[in-house]
Image (cartoon, rainbow, N blue to C red):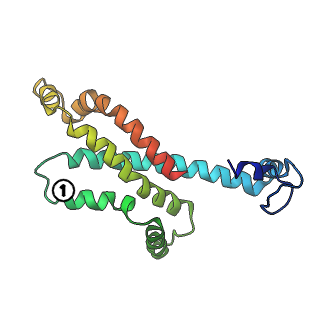
Amino acid sequence: LVIIPLAFNADPYFTYPIKAWSLRWFIEFFTDEVWQTAVKNSFIIAILATLISTTLGTLASVGLIHRNLPGRALITAILVSPMIVPIVIVAIGAYFFYSTLGIANSLTGIVMAHAALGTPFVVITVTATLAGFDQALFRAARSLGASPWRAFWRITFPLLRPALRRGMAFAAATAV
């Protein structure tokens, strides 16, 4: 609430009390090409990072629900680590890693970094839903002749939709 009035400040610096009111910053935002490019890039990054993190997080969750998966706890810890490690450490690590790949200052690198930050949210929400999933439904579809892929799309996926929406929302909020 304290920041909102500053958007209408005519002065070039954030100062209180506001001496003159203006729409200067809004006009500049909507007419400056640099701002328009930044907004466009933000939407591209948010959409792509959300789609990537939702896909990877869902696939990881489907794999993590198997009780006899060797190293399951370690895999889960690695997948959730971007959520636990301070963002500055993640950013520095990503920058140095992406520098070796030559994508440090590119849209691809930023999308990948945001996808990595959003994936843990998807993994947690989808895994929590799959933990309560009755595997007998999947086995029944298989026993009636459905392929594993078809059984997943017809039985498991519809039950996962609410969790996917929640995971996508968290991933999108992280990417924005």
The quarter holding residue 115 reads bottom left
In the rendered image, the residue lying farthest to the front is 17
On screen, 45 above or below 166? below
Asked whether, in this view, residue 162 is left or right of residue 153, the answer is: right
Query: Residue 60 at what x, y percent from top left?
Result: 28, 50
In the rendered image, the residue lying farthest to the top is 144
On screen, 26 above or below 113? above
Q: Which residue: 13% across, 58% down? A: 70
Question: SS of the residue at dot 1?
Answer: helix
Query: Residue 13 at what x, y percent from top left?
Result: 80, 63
Amino acid identity at mark 1: Arg
Asked whether, in this view, residue 112 is left or right of residue 128, the answer is: right
Q: Which residue: 16% across, 60% down? A: 71
Query: Residue 14 at what x, y percent from top left?
Result: 77, 61
Q: Which residue: 27% across, 27% down? A: 154
Question: Could you say which is closer to the camera, residue 83 or residue 164?
Answer: 83
Q: Mark 1 points at which residue?
A: 72
Asked whether, in this view, residue 131 is left or right of residue 118, the answer is: left
Query: Residue 145 at what x, y percent from top left?
Result: 14, 26
On screen, 16 above or below 154? below
On screen, 167 above or below 105? above
